[in-house]
Amino acid sequence: MTQTPDARTERTDRRAGELTPRELLRWAWRQLTSMRTALILLLLLALAAVPGSVIPQENLDSLETSRWREAHPTLAPIYDRLGLFDVYGSVWFAAVYILLMVSLIGCILPRTWVYLRAIRAEPPRAPRNLERLPDHASYDTDLGGEAVLTRARAVLRERGYRVRAAADGDDAVSAERGYLREVGNLLFHLSVVVVLVGFAMGGLFGYKGGMIVVVGTPVANTPNSYDDLVPGTLFQAEDMDPFVFTVDDFDVEWIEDGPGIGTSRGFASHLTYRERDGEEKEYRLRVNHPLKVGSTELFLIGHGYAPVITVRDGEGNIAYSGPTIFLPQGPDLLSFGVVKAPDARPEQIGLDGLFFPTFVMTPDGDLTNVPGRPRNPLLSMSVYRGDLDMDAADSTSQSVYVLDTSKATKVEGEDGKDLRLDLSPGETAELPDGLGSVTFERVVDWNRIQISQTPGKRIALAGVVLALVGLLGSLFIRPRRVWVRAVAGGGGTLVTVAALDRTGGGDVTTVIEELVEALAEEEKT
Amino acid sequence: MSDADWSALSNTAIAVAGGLYFLALVAHLVEWSALAGRRQHETATTEAAEGGGVAVATGPADDLGSGSDREERVARFARIGLAVTVLALVAHLVALVARGLAADPNRVPWGNMYEFTMAGTFVVAAGYVGLYRRFRLAWMAPLVVGLVVTLLMVAVIWLYNPVGPLSDSLNSPWLVIHVVSAVLATGAFTLGGILSATYLVKMRRPVGPIMSRVPELAALDRTAYRIHAFAFPVWTFAVLITGPIWAHQAWSSYWNWDPKEVWAFITWVVYAAYLHARSTAGWKGRNAALLALVGMATLWFNFIGINYFSTTSQHSYADAAAVVERP
């Protein structure tokens, strides 16, 4: 503020207690940078983070979020306006942490200046009455005062204290240690800002996305290949590293007996990839072992089955053919999937149903799946004919995992019940009424590959590590002042040792005991 | 020994440990009741009005014999309690080690919630025994032992899972570094929380047979702070350094705002507030202790509760197939 003349004229005719804008600003700044405000902001930050762990978040689990929206039609628009489906990207969450950062910087900068002045300062003179300090001890000695003080200086220096320069007429030694505590404190708080910068870089310039890759099918790293893509605000598609990759082979190590039977011990993808103009390389992609290509990283995070299905229409033409991704419904990999053949003639054909990796018929006649290695694959699908509503603008009908049957009719078998096709690999079923046929050729695996670029991650990591170092310094370096006074009297010298813990919480009695012991020991030698 | 034998040994050992902890708890309760009787007897006239609030039921003071008898009784049961706690700790350790050896391949014994809780309570009990002399923790014996018994019961009754191999995402060296530091910090925060809770109780009721044995408010506050000051950097290391590094390797992004991460962050922020509050006028003392308790509540909610509240957490290891994601 440079309008001091204005402020001065105002001052004459304002009411008592009224603040000039400048004073108001200063007051506001003081309030913001006070510890009390920082504390409240910290607690607000903790509180503000809670909703995101309870309400499904758009960026984390869009499927769950859309389900939640459908289940709560009145609340959803309100939550939307409040940003509750994207808490960590919302304005109010940002407001809390930005205010906290400003408060932190406002607190740290002045302290840095104070510290820079204090770091060169000598330990202060001894108080007149050391006995008034809560922690002190005295003893008598035959040594002269000057000798005691010289020894005290040596002992204290040895223990890492800074000792006040000796001056004529001194009857006491002043010493101080623990100057680095404040350095640790400042380092910690500045590092928090560094972490935030690194984190923001990742959020702004990075991206993460995922794709389902069928084994044997080459994929290019372009936005179109992704099933879901969450780009940073400033991320541009041309920043994507150009490469192509293929999952050539995929194997799962199943647990065949003992506890955990039917689950997998691990799985691995045998991957070949090629950067633009580069030569082809191989990599064995596993959980916890990502592949790095340029600045992009690929992660294997899941797998499932894709039955290869061929649909022939009533005219004998292939209306649909290829590996069809079925989504696991649970840990046993019983999977659900759909087939859409909109080009089939005379009518469109749709299939939906389950894939059993290991199918077993229970005595009751129910179909069940046994977890583990696929031993007896079975495809069990219902058939629909008619309009699959593929032209509708509604997004749900365009999902490859959902079949819109609102305008289609379920095909019935000869017995008048709904038709179910139960197919083992290699089998073909004819559809009634000359609709065509469905063939279950074989099963291939698919992998869920997560791909991301995270710029700034090293900055963030360095920031946290520095913060930890600073934290350790600020918590465990104990700054304290020690005074040793030697006064002649009663034929000898009365030595008084006193100490003051500057953090207020420390226990200095043992420090004094050790010092007295060390001084006495030196006397003996 | 076969894996099944190791597994059976682990189950037996944890039952033995639970039984011993319970015996230790009984011994300490006898100690406290004798203590309460003694104090009541000695200060019957002065403290008659304030004698309430004793958690332990006592017989009529006269039945307990003379003062020195009671003194001896208190000391004897304190010794018995501690000795039994140490035995329980050994059984607890055997249970943990056997659990690790029961898995094929052998692994660290913290692959699911049952094992996390078993390891966490071990750290609480070991920390208490280790610091018993240094911080003169005799007074907190029934609180610690009672808490450990309760949590072990929760683990055995509700969280038990047969020993199995690690799910693939857990199969990483970071399982050792990340979880050891998280469990260590959890145990230390819990000890600190007990101290802060005692601080608040003592603040409201400074006198009384049991309370007069508890250290001074200032000493309680200082010890609580020192334990929290140890736990906070360890927690920082666990959730803000090793956690993100591992998350980046396994899940492609070092910070996912996964519910477990969110709550670990909340815990971190609350304890950061506690450390600041201790040096802020108007917040030190009572409010700081309250913050420590809020911190402990968020910590344990995160440790156990969030797995049941959130189905989307990538940390829900109760479910072995957490790694199979829906696209």
Image (cartoon, coloured by chain):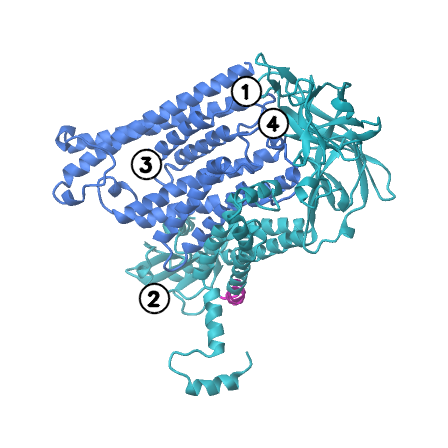
User: Which numbered mark, 3 or 4, is in the foreground of this view?
Assistant: 4
Residue of label 3:
B138
Residue of label 2:
A128
Q: CA distance from mark 4 to mark 1?
A: 23 Å
Q: Which chain, by letter, is blue?
A: B
Give above or below for A203 relative to A260.
Answer: below
Element carrying mark 4 = loop
Element carrying mark 2 = loop
Q: CA distance from mark 2 to mark 1?
A: 69 Å
Name the residue type under label 4.
Pro
Look at the image and give the colour of chain A: cyan
Residue A247: where, in percent of width, then height? 78, 32
Q: Are marks 4 and 2 in contact (CB under 8 Å)?
A: no
User: Which numbered mark, 3 or 2, is in the foreground of this view?
Assistant: 3
Residue range in magenta is: A108-121
Image point 62% across, 21% down: which residue? A371
Residue B197: name its quadrant. Answer: top left
Residue of label 4:
A331
Crowd band around label 2 with a 10 angstrom C-alpha radius: few (<14), some (14–19), many (20+):
few
Name the residue type under label 2.
Arg
Name the residue type under label 3.
Ala
Name the residue type under label 1.
Ala
